[in-house]
């Protein structure tokens, strides 16, 4: 390795150490007040006599209680619920042809990052499994300053102009009169807003798809959404869209499963992320860029500045140029995950903004929100927000100032300090805004190139596999069935008919209405007062692409079963060899096996082995696992057959289309399930009895087929037989 690489690594490590300088370790230490006074008794207030009143004099009590009373800060207006992790970004391909950003040009560099995933709608204590977009915000601590990529797991957004954002958020949040429902879009105000906002059509397709109920944060894509600009050392610019591609593939849960998990473990996603990192299964994503040369700005049927549009990968492939690895959990949730402050305006030389009007509003909103949430202008001094490049300027004072600025002066230009801190100028790596051409009159309006609201909604819908289309249709049926105002449902049906008539028809049937042929008021209720309906009518262009493979999760990789969780259902008398064989095979592939039994502690194997139990039928549920295995052993099988919770476990796993494998002598327990009754009686020659249902006498065949089935994630075709009593 060249010497300067070592220097670089050392510098990065040193800087990370500096970042952590506020870490407190109380091991072996005496309890003190915040003033450093040693405290003798932290369990009793100061009183006038043993049974007397507490005394106002008790400054130790008052300090402790006052601090406690002020523990909460305002939660984020949106994205309040989140989970974060530290990691590194490693560049694999030098992008200096397009950008001068150091962390994207020097392949020897490893850039520390902090990532925060989130849901958008719910409060801080809400469920992880809400139907919602997920935030995917990455802070790169680069040597040239912090770069924040504040994205989502969906590549487009509801609205095109940021002035609409407060209304969108008011509509999706709980309704104002009774603060119901929490973390859910299935209510009147949201759909009233959407039914009057045709530009949301594309995003609605994504949000009603299974992308909105991920299996894990580790199995989601991420997108910067807007077109940004790259600028290279020669000052040449191009447009760029950012992507994160999870190495474990993109996977989701079933909606019924999501609702179940919300009750049984609302922390499911944050726990999953935490446990993966603790166990050394570091989540990874490839970082990708779609690059559009400046001269191609008007080449496409959509406007690059319109955040309700994506660039199909068939038109501009995603170049995978680096890898993100999350390898360290935060030490303290509040100090790091809650106080981290992202901002789309945190950029570095080589990265600049396009004129996307949604992005421009964000450039104002993020600092403003941090001022409120973190209480003042010094939030950049909180350790998690500090730049690893040292900060020098003439900004001073304010709430909670940490930095001690020495000397007499805080102004520039100055002669007193020899002009310091001096302006960098381009040669020293200072930021220079790209001199993008600007023309036109001041106007409160939008470009006509933004008015095609349905082509990409259609493209997304048409690109889905059959099960994905069914899920999307079911999601709309669910949501609109919860809408109480009939007129909103009708408007939505008309709206959906602009995307796909078949889809609108199915939803109409489900909500007991007909698809209206026309509306009394125009679909777009937000046009300017002085614009005619015709002028503002949505333009529906025929997209040149009928389908885009990248939009379907079905095309996600299916061979990797690392970190997949497999439930092994067992009781006393289980065949320990059968457990061991499957455990060995699955763990060799990186999966995790947990034995679930009627009670905690140990169960006895049929040959007297003692087998540790991870969870009981009371604390575990099939929705926490990706697949189920039932080993043999006469007594164990008989106990499971008679245990309603075990049978429910299997029925539910079947309903949620998961792989289920069993020893041939466990068939008796399987026969007690709903799906078991449908299995052929003589299975002697079979290994795959039904899609994803595997039985074998031979442990090695069983393991091979089971591993393949787990890799496929789900067997959605099972849903055709919908009447599963789980
Ligand atoms: Fe935003 C938070 C992503 C549009 C205003 N946003 C926030 C977070 C993410 C996004 C990931 C959470 C960051 C964290 O984990 O702390 N937001 C997006 C994306 C958008 C988007 C991908 C569209 C492309 N946002 C958007 C608009 C506005 C905001 C148009 C306002 C004009 N967003 C905010 C905010 C938040 C926020 C109110 C709340 C907490 C915070 O910023 O720090 O300022």
Image (tube, grey):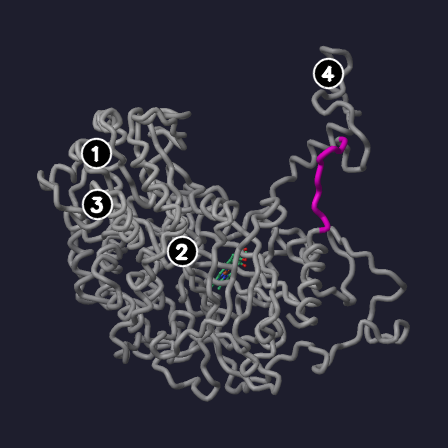
> Mark 4 to mark 2: distance in Å?
57 Å
User: Of tags 4 and 1, which is closer to the observer?
Assistant: 1
Q: Residues within 10 Å of mark 4 (few under 14, many from 20)?
A: few
User: Of tags 3 and 2, which is closer to the observer?
Assistant: 3
For marks 3 and 2, the one nearer the N-term is 2
Q: Position of residue 629 (x, y in %)?
A: 28, 39
Looking at the rendering, the stretch of residues picked out in magenta corresponds to 21-30
> Mark 3 to mark 4: distance in Å?
71 Å
Q: Tell me the residue that label 4 is attached to.
A: 53
- Residue at 22% across, 49% down: 692
User: Of tags 3 and 4, which is closer to the observer?
Assistant: 3
Where, by quadrant of the figure, is residue 31 drawn? Answer: top right
Q: Tell whether label 2 touches label 4 (CB within 8 Å).
A: no
Q: Reply above or below: 619 against 358.
A: above
Where, by quadrant of the figure, is residue 223 drawn? Answer: bottom left
Q: Position of residue 565 (x, y in %)?
A: 37, 44
> Mark 4 to mark 1: distance in Å?
68 Å
User: Of tags 4 and 2, which is closer to the observer?
Assistant: 2
Q: Tell me the residue that label 2 is attached to.
A: 219
How many marks do you count on the picture? 4
Q: Tell me the residue that label 3 is attached to.
A: 694
Can residue 598 be seen from the camera position used here? Answer: no
* Quarter occupied by the C terminus: top left
**Helix, strand or loop for disc 4:** loop
């Amino acid at each position: 390795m060249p010497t300067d690489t070592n220097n670089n690594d050392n510098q990065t490590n040193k800087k990370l150490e500096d970042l952590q300088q506020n870490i407190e370790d109380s091991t072996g230490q005496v309890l003190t007040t915040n003033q450093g006074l040693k405290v003798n008794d932290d369990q009793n207030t100061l009183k006038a006599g043993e049974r007397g009143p507490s005394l106002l004099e008790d400054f130790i009590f008052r300090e402790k209680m006052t601090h406690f009373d002020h523990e909460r800060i305002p939660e984020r207006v949106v994205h309040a619920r989140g989970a974060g992790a530290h990691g590194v970004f490693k560049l694999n391909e030098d992008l200096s042809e397009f950008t001068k950003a150091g962390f994207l040009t020097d392949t020897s560099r490893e850039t520390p990052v902090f990532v925060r995933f989130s849901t958008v709608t719910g409060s801080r204590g809400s469920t992880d499994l809400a139907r919602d977009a997920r935030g995917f915000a990455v802070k790169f601590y680069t040597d040239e300053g912090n770069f924040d990529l504040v994205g989502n797991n969906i590549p487009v957004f509801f609205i095109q102009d940021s002035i609409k954002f407060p209304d969108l958020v008011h509509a999706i949040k709980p309704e104002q009169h009774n603060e119901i429902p929490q973390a859910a879009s299935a209510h009147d105000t949201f759909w009233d807003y959407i039914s009057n906002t045709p530009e949301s059509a594309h995003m609605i397709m994504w949000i009603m798809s299974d992308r909105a109920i991920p299996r894990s944060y580790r199995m989601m894509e991420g997108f910067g959404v807007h077109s940004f600009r790259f600028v290279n050392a020669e000052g040449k610019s191009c447009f760029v869209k950012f992507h994160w591609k999870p190495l474990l593939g993109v996977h989701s849960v079933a909606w019924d499963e999501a609702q179940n998990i919300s009750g049984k473990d609302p922390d499911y996603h944050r726990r999953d992320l935490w446990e993966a990192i603790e166990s050394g299964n570091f989540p990874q994503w490839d970082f990708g860029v779609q690059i559009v040369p400046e001269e191609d700005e008007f080449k496409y049927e959509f406007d690059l500045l319109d955040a309700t549009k994506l660039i199909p990968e068939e038109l501009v492939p995603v170049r995978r140029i680096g890898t993100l690895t999350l390898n360290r959990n935060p030490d303290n949730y509040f100090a790091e995950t809650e106080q981290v402050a992202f901002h789309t305006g945190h950029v570095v030389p080589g990265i600049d903004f396009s004129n996307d009007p949604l992005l421009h509003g964000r450039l104002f909103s993020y600092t403003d929100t941090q001022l409120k949430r973190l209480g003042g202008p010094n939030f950049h001094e909180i350790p998690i927000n500090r730049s690893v490049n040292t900060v020098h300027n003439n900004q001073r004072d304010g709430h909670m100032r940490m930095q001690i600025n020495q000397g007499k002066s805080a102004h520039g230009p100055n002669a007193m300090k020899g002009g310091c801190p001096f302006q960098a100028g381009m040669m020293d790596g200072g930021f220079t805004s790209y001199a993008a051409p600007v023309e036109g009159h001041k106007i409160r309006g939008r470009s006509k190139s933004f008015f095609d609201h349905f082509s990409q909604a259609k493209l997304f819908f048409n690109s889905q596999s059959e099960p994905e289309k069914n899920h999307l249709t079911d999601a709309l049926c669910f949501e609109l069935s919860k809408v109480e105002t009939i007129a909103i449902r009708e408007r939505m049906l008309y709206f959906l008919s602009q995307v796909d008539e078949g889809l609108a028809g199915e939803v109409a049937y489900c909500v007991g209405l007909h698809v209206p042929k026309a509306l009394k008021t125009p679909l777009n209720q937000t046009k300017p007062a002085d614009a005619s309906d015709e002028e503002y009518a949505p333009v529906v262009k025929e997209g040149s692409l009928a389908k885009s493979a990248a939009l379907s999760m079905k095309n996600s990789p299916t061979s990797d079963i690392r970190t997949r969780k497999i439930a092994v259902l067992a009781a006393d008398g289980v065949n320990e060899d059968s457990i061991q064989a499957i455990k060995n095979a699955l763990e060799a592939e990186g999966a995790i096996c947990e034995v679930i039994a009627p009670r905690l502690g140990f169960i006895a194997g049929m040959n007297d082995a003692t087998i540790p139990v991870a969870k009981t039928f009371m604390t575990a549920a099939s929705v926490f696992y990706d697949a189920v295995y039932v080993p043999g052993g006469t007594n164990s099988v008989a106990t499971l057959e008679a245990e309603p919770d075990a049978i429910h476990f299997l029925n539910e796993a079947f309903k949620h289309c998961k792989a289920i494998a069993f020893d041939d002598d466990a068939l008796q327990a399987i026969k007690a399930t709903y799906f078991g009754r449908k299995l052929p009686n003589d299975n002697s020659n079979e290994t795959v009895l039904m899609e994803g249902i595997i039985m074998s006498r031979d442990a090695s065949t069983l393991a091979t087929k089971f591993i393949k089935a787990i890799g496929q994630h789900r067997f959605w075709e099972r849903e055709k037989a919908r009447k599963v009593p789980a």
